[in-house]
Image (cartoon, helix red, strand yellow):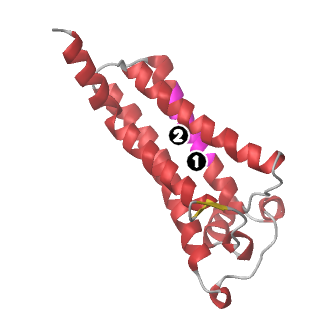
């Protein structure tokens, strides 16, 4: 399997997850909380890094650079999703109070303060609107990020192994 194919599959996986998030929002009526929005940004960044790698089709060390960029975006998303899952596991009396919406925060605060406030989370992030097989949506998002992270780190190895096996 070529490096382009491997990274294209990563991009399809990331953009497919993003499409599913928009499906849940616009067709199932699940409104995203601020942490969900940050997870969407991370999944988009992951997919974009995979897509650029697929379009470029680099060789050698440049493959590892793209793998690192994809892994960094997926790892950031996994950390945000992990924080989201942790907030959902808190007892009700320990959940931070609801704050203003993300749009309002962006209007009145610098982005660094908005980022810090959103990552602390609030009650809207702690509610569990839907689950599947015992995992909440942020739990499944965490699993998706973990899979994309592993795929990113293995992409140069998979491409190299298929390249060496095709030479014989």
Residue 72: % across, % down: 44, 46
Q: Categorize mark 2 by other alpha carbons within 10 Å: few (<14), some (14-19), many (20+).
A: many
Foreground residue among 75 and 19:
19
Q: What element carries label 1?
A: helix
**The furthest residue to the front:** 133
Rendered-image quadrant of the N terminus:
top left
- To which residue does mark 2 refer? 46
- 43 in the magenta segment: yes
| Secondary structure of the residue carrying numbered label 2 | helix
Point out the residue furthest to the bottom here: 93
Proximity of marks 2 and 1: CB atoms separated by less than 8 Å = yes
**Tag count:** 2
Looking at the image, residue 8 lies above or below residue 126: above
Q: Is residue 53 toward the left or the right of residue 32 in the image? A: left
Magenta-highlighted stretch: main secondary structure? helix
Query: Residue 156 appears in which quarter of the rendering?
Result: top left
Any mark on residue 42, and which? 1
Residue drawn at the location 61% of the way across and 53% of the way down: 39
Q: In this view, does 126 lie above or below 68?
A: below
Give the quarter of the figure containing the C terminus: top left
Residue that appears at 54% across and 73% down = 86
Q: Is residue 156 above or below residue 73?
A: above
Residue at 34% of width from left, 26% of height from top? 62
Looking at the picture, how far across and down is residue 88, in whole percent?
61, 74
Range of residues picked out in magenta: 41-51
Q: Which residue is drawn at 50% across and 18% down?
A: 55
């Amino acid at each position: 399997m070529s490096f382009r194919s491997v990274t294209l599959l990563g991009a399809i996986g990331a953009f497919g997850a993003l499409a599913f998030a928009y499906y849940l929002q616009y067709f199932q009526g699940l409104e995203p909380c601020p942490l969900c929005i940050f997870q969407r940004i991370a999944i988009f960044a992951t997919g974009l890094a995979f897509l650029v790698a697929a379009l470029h089709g680099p060789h050698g060390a440049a493959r590892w650079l793209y793998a690192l960029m994809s892994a960094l975006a997926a790892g950031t998303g996994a950390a945000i999703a992990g924080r989201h899952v942790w907030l959902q596991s808190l007892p009700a009396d320990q959940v931070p109070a609801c704050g203003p919406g993300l749009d309002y925060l962006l209007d009145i605060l610098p982005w660094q303060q908005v980022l810090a406030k959103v990552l602390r989370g609030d009650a809207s992030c702690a509610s569990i609107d839907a689950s599947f097989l015992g995992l909440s949506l942020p739990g499944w998002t965490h699993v998706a990020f973990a899979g994309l992270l592993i795929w990113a780190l293995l992409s140069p190895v998979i491409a190299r192994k298929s390249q060496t096996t095709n030479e014989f």
